[in-house]
């Protein structure tokens, strides 16, 4: 299974809720944000393209950078 990680500007639980709809469209629930990490790392498991994840974040008003 493929694992992608992104540094994000998702800061809190409300932010995670804000991206949930778009992220579930592309990653079908196989994602999580580590809010305790300084870079707020978004981890996505599965066959999902980097571009679709970044687009989902952008459409939710957030940014992501592959790490």
Image (spheres, helix red, strand yellow):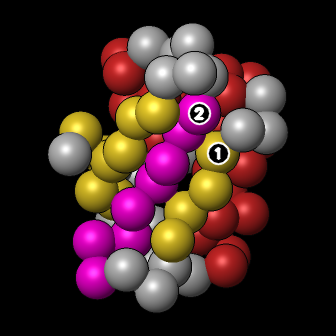
Q: Is residue 32 left or right of residue 41?
A: right
Name the residue: 20% across, 45% down. 67
64 sits left or right of 62 in the view: left
Q: Nearer the viewer, residue 19 or 44?
A: 44
Q: Nearer the viewer, residue 35 or 4?
A: 4
Q: Which residue is mark 2?
A: 45
| Magenta stretch: dominant secondary structure | strand
Q: Position of residue 15 (x, y in %)?
A: 59, 69
Residue 62 x, y percent position in the rendering: 41, 52
Q: Say if the magenta span includes residue 43.
A: yes
| Camera-side mark, 2 or 1 | 2
Return the mark for residue 65. none
Q: How many marks on residues?
A: 2
Residue 4 x %, y % = 40, 35
Return the x and y of residue 46 as percentages of the image width and height. Answer: 61, 22
Whether residue 14 is visible, yes or no, is yes
Q: Is residue 46 above or below residue 5?
A: above
Q: Residue at x 57, y 13 (%)?
A: 47
Mark number displayed over residue 31: 1
Q: Which quarter of the rendered picture does the N terminus lie within?
A: top right
- Is 19 contained in the magenta span? no
Residue positioned 45% across, 67% down in the render: 10
Front residue of 58 and 12? 12
Residue 61 is at least partly visible in this image: no
Question: Which badge, 2 or 1, is on the more N-terminal residue?
Answer: 1
Left or right position of 12 against 30: left
Picture layout, residue 28 above or below residue 23 = above
Mark 1 neighbour density, 10 Å: few (under 14) some (14–19) many (20 or more)? some
Q: Which residues are magenta?
A: 38-45
Instruction: Look at the numbered discs 2 and 1 and tell me whether their residues touch, using CB distance below 8 Å.
Output: yes
> What secondary structure is found at the residue carrying circle 2?
strand
């Amino acid at each position: 299974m493929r694992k992608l990680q992104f540094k994000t500007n998702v800061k809190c639980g409300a932010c995670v809720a804000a991206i949930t709809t778009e992220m579930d469209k592309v990653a079908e629930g196989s994602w999580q944000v580590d809010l305790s990490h300084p870079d707020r790392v978004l981890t996505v498991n599965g066959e999902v393209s980097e571009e679709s994840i970044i687009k989902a974040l952008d459409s939710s008003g957030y940014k992501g950078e592959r790490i």
